[in-house]
Amino acid sequence: MDYCIKNMVCDRCIAAVKAVLASLGVEHYDVKLGTVSVPEPLGADTLKSFDAGLRELGFQRVSDQNDELVERAKAAVLDHVRNEAECHLKLSACVEHQMGVPYDTVSRIFSQREGRTIEKYHIAQKVERVKELLSYGGRSLDEIADISGYSSGAHLSRQFKAVTGLTPSEFVKLGCPRNPLDKI
């Protein structure tokens, strides 16, 4: 049985959801971004406790089919952003490949539910990834551009400024905080 979980964005989220399952005595589970798989459906009491544990962490179990599609699309975009330098597929092909659903269907439902396109969500996630890499220090803008799938440091800088209003160097000088990924 699979359960779709909203707002999971990183490995720490996976670890947190695993901890909730372990605290409930649930065994034999697989947790990935946005999904929990268990061999059998959780009982009503366990499901209620699971939902409460998720809420405490800022997550939510999704039961609506279209909301689930949106969460799966977000997980696919996050995976693409984290592996963009190695992925040789365009965003649309990558999302379609990971989800097994035609991209135009995913894109239409995503836009209806989120009020923005998958492409805008992708750009916002890429900029947050760049902020993360900038905050670590020690890499040039061209290296960060290469890691995050930009064609050049100049392209990265233009898109970064368009989204944040700051150049990457201004961002570093000001020590601006990153946005929580589930709020992007």
Image (tube, rainbow, N blue to C red):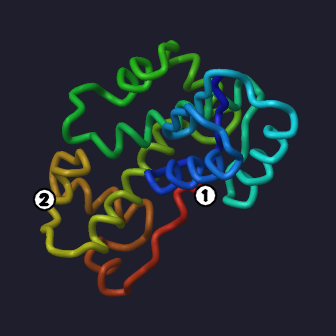
Q: Amino acid at mark 2?
A: Glu
Quarter of the view holding residue 135: bottom left
Q: Name the residue at 43% across, 80% down.
A: 176
Circle 1 residues within 10 Å: few <14, some 14–19, many ≥20 = few
Q: Name the residue at 42% across, 48% down.
A: 123
Q: Secondary structure at mark 1?
A: helix
Position of 108 relative to 100 (above/below) = below
Most foreground residue, 138 or 160: 138
| Quarter in which the C terminus is drawn | bottom right
Circle 2 residues within 10 Å: few <14, some 14–19, many ≥20 = some
Report the label total: 2
Q: Which residue is mark 1?
A: 183
Nearer-N-terminus badge (2/1): 2
| Quarter in which the N terminus is drawn | top right
Marking on residue 121: none
Mark 2–mark 1 Cα distance, whole angstroms, equals 27 Å
Marking on residue 143: 2
Most foreground residue, 33 or 40: 40
Q: Name the residue at 13% across, 68% down.
A: 140
Looking at the image, residue 91 sits to the left or right of residue 117; the answer is: left
Give residue 72's position: percent from left, percent from top.
Answer: 55, 31
